[in-house]
Amino acid sequence: DGPFSAVAGPSAACPVVAAVFAQINDKLIKNGYNSLGWLNPFIYATGESTAAAYNDVTTGNTNGGHGTGFPAAPGWDAATGFGTPNYPSLVEAALAAQAAVKK
């Protein structure tokens, strides 16, 4: 029962991103396709081929207030990977990928 406060970092981002991919899997299953399974191949394939799949984060770093950490930069970087997920674009890419496999 205290005041609201902002949260940031992996503790907040990981469950949000997991929920995004859970919703993508739900959409795939409702359309008669398999779930994505192991996500790394899909994340890297869409990150490298679909510019709109992620919102590129280009500023900031992972220092947590201590030292230099890893800086964000255009494209893939150790701080943010490909960036934040763009749900509509990722759903479209997932449906297209599954449709191509079913052919």
Image: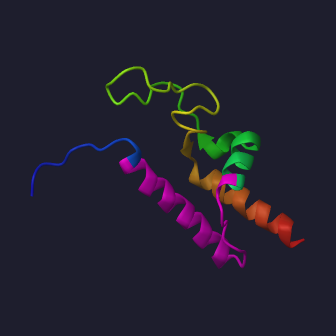
Q: Residue at x 38, y 41 (%)?
A: 9
User: Which quarter of the rendering shows the C terminus?
Assistant: bottom right
- Count of numbered circles in the view: 0
Q: Nearer the viewer, residue 68 or 57?
A: 68
Residue visible at 69% across and 76% down? 31
Residue 66 versus residue 80: which sits nearer the camera?
Answer: 66
- Which residues make up the magenta segment? 11-40
In the rendered image, residue 92 lying in the magenta stretch gets the answer: no
Q: Main secondary structure of the magenta part?
A: helix
Quarter of the image that includes the N terminus: bottom left
Q: Residue at x 36, y 49 (%)?
A: 11
Could you say where residue 7 lies in the image, as x and y percent from the top left? 30, 44
Q: Is residue 26 above or below residue 44?
A: below
5 relative to 37 in the view: left or right: left
x, y (%) of residue 91? Answer: 65, 59
Vertical placement of residue 81 versus 21, above or below: above
Q: Is residue 93 above or below residue 64?
A: below
Task: Work out whether 18 lies above or below 6.
Answer: below
Residue at (66%, 53%) from the top-left corner? 40
- Viewer-side residue, 103 vs 77: 77
Q: Residue furthest top?
A: 68
